[in-house]
Image (cartoon, coloured by chain):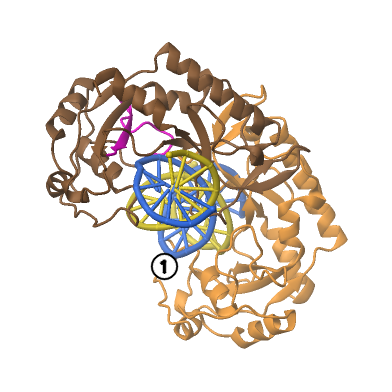
Chain colours: A orange, B brown, C blue, D yellow
DNA sequence: AGGGATCCATGATTGGATCCCA
DNA sequence: TGGGATCCAATCATGGATCCCT
């Protein structure tokens, strides 16, 4: 892969997204000297990592935003044939063993407060190499969105704090859901049950429902 | 390396140690199709891993004993020209962020309660490939040893529980000491200070002083 | 449809210990 | 001399997400 330096300013980052908008994944991959996988089932994170490299995101520095100096998180959004988000959007892992914190101080809110969304064509009929990169959207959470996520988050965290993590399913949460996030269903992490006993449970992640990300696209595009 | 199946019984494990006693490291390495490093400064764990392979220790399954089915831990002991332990013996990492536990329930005690000690010649004048493997000793903690370690452990853990981890030096502990255990001094781990604030500190390990391991050798060999 | 399960790459951590200067 | 610092290999955990069956 080609190494690209981090953008120094928000303006520079936006310029870079404009420079790749409209390109196919094959075109961008060739610029980065990467090959395009024939299917994503064995390379699920490939598109996101291609975009990261092309824009100069700080490579894999965990517990930090993708663009550290700018405090901006990058999220690709796969679009179906109708131009709507095809999948939920993974945000971060769910803390199972940390001291209680407020929504305002939570890691997930810090991540979501400054996000660069990059829509990518992802109709299954369209071969990977022909899929095109869309126009980026840089957002902060609106007061309304902040309130929507806060309510879901508080309900989730209340269940976790009272040891009922295993009662949470993907059905919970209007905009923000919790689902397994693991290598497979045998992966286990420490948690606490209702009686305060240490138990093993599946690692979980926070995911944004498509209705939430669709609304963000709608703020900027007429659909 | 050659794959060796785990020993099924304690007897089988002992037989295997007898089979390699007296061999040089070069001889054992050749059996395992491994090459001997010219010096250990860039391969510090090499001897231990050679022995693990030769005896059929379950490869690198963290949080489990070396011989899982037997509940036995393997420890090599480097001997100086006088036949005494040349170094302290690393046991396990020091938990900095866990709920308080008793010595009886501690991970370190479970590790030390059933150990197969394997002395290895380690006089610096003796080239690595010529160093010989000694006779193995299988021990359980005696009531006296258990008490000795318990007292040191309790003093250490009391300091950690009250947020004074940074006051602990290798001078503490009669038989069991705490020292840094990290890639280098820039590696940092979360801990809690006296005021309950989260701080960063060096990762630490528990080490047995040489006087402790020397006493174990003395139980079995006249020196 | 979408909830539960899974896949790859890579950085972080652990487990194996010994080094090395004051 | 031994306390503080360090080294390598391999596994684990996280961040990038999409798959796929009911």
Q: Which residues are magenta?
A: B61-80
Quadrant location of the C terminus of chain A in the rendered image: bottom right
Name the residue at the right extreme: A143
- In the rendered image, residue B146, in percent from the top left (x then y), is placed at 46, 17
Residue at image point 21% right, 29% down = B7
Front residue of B217/B82: it is: B82
Mark 1 is surrounded, within 10 Å at the Cα level, by few (under 14), some (14 to 19) or many (20 or more) other residues, namely few
Helix, strand or loop at label 1? It is loop
Front residue of A172/D5: it is: D5
* B21 sits left or right of A41 in the view: left
- In the rendered image, residue A71, in percent from the top left (x then y), is placed at 72, 68
Front residue of B119/B29: it is: B119
In the rendered image, the vertical position of residue B169 relative to residue A41, given as above or below = above
- In the rendered image, residue A99, in percent from the top left (x then y), is placed at 73, 39
* Magenta stretch prevailing secondary structure: loop
Residue at image point 15% right, 28% down = B18
Front residue of A21/B145: it is: B145
- In the rendered image, residue A23, in percent from the top left (x then y), is placed at 55, 85
Report whether residue A64 is seen.
yes
Quadrant location of the N terminus of chain A in the rendered image: bottom left
Residue at image point 70% right, 82% down = A14
* B125 sits left or right of A215 in the view: left
Q: Which residue is mark 1?
A: A39
* A208 sits left or right of C4 in the view: right
- The answer to which quarter of the image holds residue A156 is top right
In the rendered image, the vertical position of residue B70 relative to residue D12, given as above or below = above
Q: Chain of mark 1?
A: A
* A57 sits left or right of B61 in the view: right
Residue at image point 75% right, 58% down = A110
Task: Decide whether residue B63 is among the magenta residues.
Answer: yes
- The answer to which quarter of the image holds residue B101 is top right
Task: Decide whether residue B125 is among the magenta residues.
Answer: no
């Amino acid at each position: 892969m080609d190494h690209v330096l981090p953008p120094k300013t928000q303006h520079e980052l936006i310029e870079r997204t404009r420079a790749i908008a409209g390109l196919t994944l094959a075109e961008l991959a060739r610029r980065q000297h990467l090959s395009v996988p024939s299917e994503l089932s064995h390379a699920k994170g490939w598109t996101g990592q291609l975009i990261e490299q092309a824009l100069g995101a700080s490579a894999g520095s965990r517990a930090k935003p993708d663009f550290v100096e700018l405090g901006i998180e990058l999220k690709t959004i796969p679009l179906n044939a109708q131009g709507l988000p095809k999948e939920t959007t993974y945000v971060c892992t769910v803390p199972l063993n940390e001291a209680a914190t407020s929504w305002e101080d939570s890691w997930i809110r810090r991540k979501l407060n400054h996000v660069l969304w990059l829509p990518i064509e992802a109709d299954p009929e369209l071969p990977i190499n022909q899929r095109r990169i869309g126009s980026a959207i840089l957002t902060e959470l609106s007061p309304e969105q902040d309130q929507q996520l806060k309510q879901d988050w508080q309900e989730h965290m209340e269940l976790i704090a009272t040891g009922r993590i295993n009662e949470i399913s993907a059905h919970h949460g209007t905009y923000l859901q919790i689902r397994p996030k693991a290598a497979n269903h045998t992966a286990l992490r420490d948690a606490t049950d209702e009686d305060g006993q240490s138990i093993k449970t599946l690692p979980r992640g926070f995911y944004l429902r498509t209705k939430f990300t669709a609304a963000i696209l709608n703020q900027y595009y007429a659909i």
